[in-house]
Every structure is written in C-alpha cells, then in structure tokens.
Image (spheres, rainbow, N blue to C red):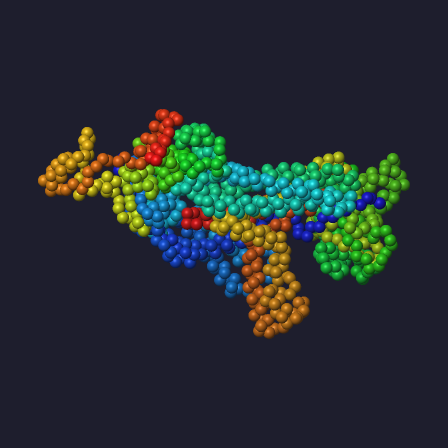
Amino acid sequence: MSGEVIVETRKLTKVYRDFWGRQKHTALRALNLEIRKGEIFGLLGPNGSGKTTTIKLLLGLLFPTDGEAFVFGKPAADVSKNERIGYLPEESYLYRFLNAEETLDFYGRLFDLDAKTRNDRAREWIERVGLGANRKRILKEYSKGMRQRIGLAQAMINDPDLVILDEPTSGLDPLGARWMKNLIVELKEQGKTVIMCSHRLEDVQDICDRIAILNLGELQAYGNVGELLQDVNRLELRASGLQINDQLRRELEELLHKHGGKLDSIGHPTTTLEDYFLRIVEESKAHPGRRFIPQEKAR
Amino acid sequence: MNSMLLATLFIERDPLRWEDLQLGILQWTQSVGGFCSIALILWLVFGWRRYSKVDRDRIAAWKKITFGALAGSGVGLFLLIIALRSTSQPEAASRQPSVLDVLQIFSGLLSLLAVLFPFAVNAMNLRPGRILGLAKLSFQEAIRRRVVYAFGALLLVFLFSSWFIPYKPEDQVRSYVQVVYWAMAPLFLLTSALLAAFSIPADIKNQTIHTIVTKPVERFEIILGRFLGFMALMTVILFAMTAVSLLYVVRGVDPSAAAESLKARVPFYGDLSFLNTENENRGDNVGREWEYRSYIAGPGMGNRGPATAVWTFPMPPANLTSRDKVRSEFTFDIYRTTKGRENRGVACSFTFQTWRFREGDDKIYEREKRQALSDRKGRTDAQIDNELAEKFGYYVFPSKPIFDYQTLYLDIPAGLFKNALGADPQRMNELKNSNRPVQPLMVKVVCLDPTQYIGMARYDFYFRADDPESANEKLYFSMNFFKGAIGLWLRMCLVVGLSVCMSTYLTGVISLLFTLILYMGGLVQDFIRQVASGANPGGGPTEAFLRLVRRENMASPLEQTTANQIATNLDKLFRWVVSRLLDVIPDVDRLDFTVFVAEGFDISSGQIVLNAIILVGYLIPWAILAYYLLKWREIASS
C-alpha cells in the first residue's frame, strides 16, 4: 500500500432539496476522507447514514451541495476518471434481456475496448465468476447471486485501478460471500484500491484495511481497522492441550488477581458459523451421499 | 380527344426550393439564437452563481474567455435590439431585411455559438464505438421486448382492407396507397414514440443507467445511442413493411388502375400570372370558399381584353429535346354561369411560346403552316408542327375541351423546347435593351366558351419531364413508393428525436404526451399560423369571447371602446406567444409524401434532401437542450 491518495473528499456535503429548492434532508455533512492506493476501504453505517450517497458523489451520480470530491486527482463530475473505475451497485442493475456475454460486450464497448480485448476479458471474467455454463442465458433467468457475479464481472471488464463495491456480498450464499471476499483480497494484492460499503460487519472486519463509520451523514470514526477495534482494557489468552477444571480455574484466578486483574470467563472457543458452514459443505463434497439423520426421540 | 386521367395533385403550399434555403438558415439562426439568448440570460442569473469558486477557477482560461465573449456580445446585442425595437416605429413589411433584422441574426448567431461552445468542446470526447454500443443495446432491447410483433397489426390491413374500402377500378391503386400509408403512419409513429419516450426514464427508474454513466460515457452519447438504435430498428422494419405494402398495392391491380396510377410523373412547373383579370397575381374570384384556384372568364364577360392565364417556365431541362413530343398535363376547374351543353367540356385555347418568339411572328407562323400543310413533302402533321415550333418558338392548340375533375394532356412538339434552349444573342440583346425579362417558355390559356369560367392554380399545369410512354413506369412507381416511405421515415426521426430529447428530463408518459402534442400541433400548423398572424375570422380568444357573449357578428369591426381596446391588446400578447410557439412546432405536413405516391407524382430527391435538412435544423436545438438537461441532471436523485 503506497501513500498515493486515490480518493479525496473535502467538506463534502449533500443536501437533498424539494422542487422549490427548500432543504429537505442533509444526507452528508462536511465529509473529509482520504483513500490511498492499494488499500481496501470500508464505509460503514446504518441505513440512511450517507454511505451510498458518498459513493454516488464519488461516481458523479450526484452533485455535491458543498465541498469537493476528487478521484485520481480529477473532480468527481469529470467523466474521464471513470476510465479507471469499476463499480458494482448494491443491486445488480443490469439489462435483463441480455445474456452474460452480451452484457460484458456492451460494457466493454462503453470503455471503447477493441473487439478482441472485449472477448478475451468477457471470457476470462465469465469463467472467473463461475458463470461459464450460463453464459448464453439471459440475465432475467439468473438468480440474485448470479446477477451479483455478472455485476462484478462488468465492474472488472476495464481492469480498473479503483473498484467501488456497494454491498458486494448482498444476495450471495456463504460460499459466494467467501469467494467475493477472497476476490477482493486478490484485487488488493494486484495493487488495486477497493472501496466497499457493507452491512455485514464481519466481512468488513475480515478484509478491510481502513474504515469510516458514518451516522446521520456525519463521520463518526475513521482509521485502521485493527487500531479501531483494539480494546486495551481487556486481555485475551489462548491455550491448547488443556481441559477446563476447577483447579485450573482457581489457579488462573489467583494469578490474575496477583497482577491486579480478574477472570471474566473461561471456556472453549466456538468457530464462526461461516467457517462451520463452509466446513460442512466441503465435507459433503468429499463424501457424496452422506447425510445427517436426526436421532429419534426416546419413546 | 385524348383519354382522361383522374390524378390531381393539389399543392397548397409551395414545395421547398434550394433558393429558399439561404433565407431559411437566416430565419433559423434568428429564432434559435433568440431562444439561446434567453437561455443564456436565465443561466447567467440562476446558473452561474451555483458554480463554486473552485469550480470556476478550474475552467481553462481560454474556455472562459471564448464563452464569455460569445455569450456577452450575443446577449448584449439581444438586449439592445429589444430596447431599439420597443422604442422604434414598426417598419412596413419588406423583402429586404432591416438593419435590426441583420443585427438580430448576428446576435442570434453569437448566442447560438456560445450555447454550442461547451457542447462542441464536449463533442470531441464522443466515441463512435460507445455510441454504437448504446445503439446496439437499444436495438436489442426493442427486439427482445417483441416490439416487432406490433407491426403484425398491418396484416389486418392487408387481409381485410379490401372488404371495406370502396374504390372505382381506375382508382384502385390510389385508394390502396393511401390506406397502406395511413395504416403504417400511426403504427410506426406511435411505436417509435413509445419506444423512445420510455427508454431513458425506464433506465433511470430501474437504475440501469447507473452502470452506464459510471463508465466513461458522455451523456450526449446516451442520447445519440438511443436515437440511432431505435431508428436503425424502425428503418429495417419500415423497409420490410414498405416492400410488403408495395406487393399488396400492385398485386392483381386492375389494368385501368395500373394505366392510371402506376406512374411517377416528373412535373416541370412554372409560375402563374394573369392578364386582364382583377390583378396580375390572382384571377377573378367566383365566390368559391376554397381559394386554391382563381378564374379566367370566357369572352364577352367584363370590358377588359380576353382573360388569360400565363404560366412562365424557367429554362426547360435539355433531355426534353431528345423526344419527338413533350407531354403537358393540366387539371382545371369549371365554374359555370349557364348549364352549357351536356357531355361537352368548356373549350380553351393553349398558346406556347419561347423567349425567342417575336411579336408578329405568329402571323408568319400561321402562313408557313398553311403552306406546309398544302405542300407536305411527305411530312406528317406532327413533323410539320415540330419544324415550325423549332423555327418560331411558337405553337398553338386552338381549342381543347376541359372537363371537371379530370387531368387532361396535350403533346407538344419537342421543337419548341429546342428553340427555347437554343442560343440567340441577338434576341437576348433585344430583350436586354428593352428592359424586358427573359421568359424562357410561356403558356397562355384562354377560355373560349362565353358565360363560363375556368379556374386554375400554379400547379395545375405542368410539363412531363419524364417520358410518359416509358416501359418502366411500374418500376418508377415502385421506386416512388419507397421514396414515399422516406417521408414516414423522416417523421419517425422527428418523433424519436423529440421523444428521446424530452425523456432526458421528463417521465416517459409526459415525454410521450409532449411529443404527441407537438406532432399534432404540426398537423394544424396552418391554423396556428393564422391565429398567430391574426388572419383567422373573429380575432383572438379575448375578442372572440367578447363577440360570443355580446352575440356579435365575427366579421363586423369592433367599436373603439376601452373594453375592446383591452381585449385587442390581450390578443396581441396572445398572438406573440402563439408566434413563439410556432417556432417550436414541427412542420409535419411537408414530411408527408403520401399524396405524391397516390396521385402518381415523383418525389424529387431535392424535396427529400431539403425536408431532411429542415428536420435536422428543427432537431438540433432540441438535441442541444437535451444535452444540457441530461448533463445537469442528478441521475441518482430521481
């Protein structure tokens, strides 16, 4: 990750007005952000906090009421900046009468790519998002997850330097969500900058380098994920090769007490549901035909 | 007597001529420039202050200076002209533009250039590949949404129209052509309007446009792409449907109908003036409500000399001289003051003379003709007529019976045209020295029947520039049928262009309504023009309302009362608004070529090109407006 600033906002403000120009709702208030090259940046916040408004302002879909936004050093309203941007909207808003190949060919044309590049990239990304077998089906027949995948492929057709993903795991099953997260990390490894909005905090925590938390249009927190989440008042101890017993508990309590602390809890750690689910699915692939039979209740 | 035809082409508005183009461009610059000046003033008052200082600083200095100079001088001149016009006395109508007119054109041009400047700078970023991509998308969208199926409705016309359309055998082709075009026009226009009006609003509503405008796509590329895509599809369908319609029209056609109508006459028109009538431009008024034609009286009516209709033609095309004879066709109206004789027409004489004909030569012509007829030397009548016409530039058809509602013809010796096209420096000098205009070819028509009137309009008499005895008439008709479809194609361009432009800001339904209102306004443009110029009976709406309430006759002049004065002034304001409205209403009538095909008249390439130029001129301001509306629109706030 270099120090080059890719995205910068200065006092970026967006006020929605009614037909008569009266102020209706302040969606974003004086936002100052810097997003650097090669990082995965997460925008977090509850509904209506201004995440999507920020993204739309960066993409030129909305015009700022006040302040400025720059992408690659160009004003957000400058169309030429889009040459280096890939955008996946929250819902995959694509033309449902086109099939996967036609969709990618169409978006490739919008980047003025030559026919060979369009074909090569379309083929590559259709395979990469796992839609090789469905390349000729029109998008109307796709599931939500499949549309999200082809949506991602259209965002990547120009091999962008900056990828903006609005709820990228929305509509994806846990396998798909994991695949998406891996892909985002892969993009980072290729030197691309990723901005993502998500409600799934565990996704953000897993992959984002830095985050900004917005609420009611105002920036509430901003910085490195590890630093922001660190709780310096608590201590975590992990051990293996032991079973919990009274003696162990007692001795640990004494030791902690001696150092001025106290034991809050002790127990076996649980894995995440996502990891558990993925393990089960992997096992079922390894042992086809095996299934879970619930035990009958004792009569 | 020569056989008669029914084909009658009424041309109530003069067809466009290349000479009109220059004046048209000046008027266009004046009107569009005026709108641009108003738009610039509004933008300077409301728009410029919305730009932050940083945004203003970011604009390159040369762009600011160029735009500022153009807009400042254009708007400055515009305001100056308004001030001058409001203080000066109204000038008498003149063909020569006044100084203020010239200034207004110049001011309009500057404002237009100012408005076009950002557009032109932006146009450098347009990429054909992207436009084609968007056009292809529109094409695919329409196909996959099964729009083509709508045109199956035409099958109903092909299958069942003959059950309901009464026609005389000789009128068959004419009826079929009109039915086919009248069925095709609403179907194509409505489908095009629906497709175009709902495309961009649907993209905005479904947010599919977000994935387009976040690519390096200029907003004007979206407008162009949509327009071209829909037009490409509609062009393919129109071509196919025209071919099918042509087969329908010509299939099993009655031989008399084929002889009458499967033609594409190429008329060679002249200007009409009158001698010994009320005035030179009009003949006598016989009280007919439709004033398309004016009349010449038969001998003995009135104390002037014989009333004569005179057609003056420009130099005829050289290809006419390669034939033995040239056909002239005419359709006159008869106004009878007495019943006349049953089944006999009203006789007229036709005199043809070229610019080389000298007064008094007619007597020599008659003498030589008598001699030639008595001493033929193996020559036929036609050969004698041809020789004499070439020698004297003169030919007379002494009496030809005219019938109502019929197109009649005379075959004229081609020698007359050879004479007209021949070089004669001596005669040319004579005409110049005597300050008389060179009138290459003249036709004089005199009614010979006492107590009867013959009515005629400029386009009632013409020479056939094509060969009426050509074996390829069916082929020419077919080609003309496709040319007629070009008229529909131009109207589709108009409808699609308007709908796409409107839909950049309005919703689909409102865009469609707006387009239809403008289109229908174009259909009644003549009436709107009458209202704007105050030529309609009964005055403007306020005056008409007063007359209605007071139960006053609409022809009687208003008394000079305060209320009437207020009403008249309000109507003046109303007329000014309507005149401005006229500038935004398309000239739809000119784009309808159906009547030419149906009556068997060729649609000249010049007409098509001129109408296409006018259409482009009409659509350009809308396209510029659409460019700014979409550019300034917050796509995601909808």
Residue A24 visible here: yes
Question: Residue visible at 62% across and 41% down?
Answer: B151
**Quadrant, the N terminus of chain A:** top left
Question: Residue visible at 15% across and 36% down?
Answer: A246
Instruction: Please name whichever residue, B528 or B377, is drawn nearer the observer in this view of the structure.
Output: B528
Q: Write down the quadrant of residue B477 in the picture.
A: top right
Instruction: Please name whichever residue, B268 or B535, is drawn nearer the observer in this view of the structure.
Output: B535
Q: Is residue B225 left or right of residue B376?
A: left
Residue B434 at x, y percent in the picture: 71, 52
Q: Is residue B236 left or right of residue A294?
A: right
**Quadrant, the C terminus of chain A:** top left
State the residue lying farthest toward the bottom: B561
State the residue lying farthest toward the top: A287
Residue A165 at x, y percent in the picture: 36, 39
Q: Is residue A213 left or right of residue B241?
A: left
Residue A146 at x, y percent in the picture: 42, 35
State the residue lying farthest toward the left: A258
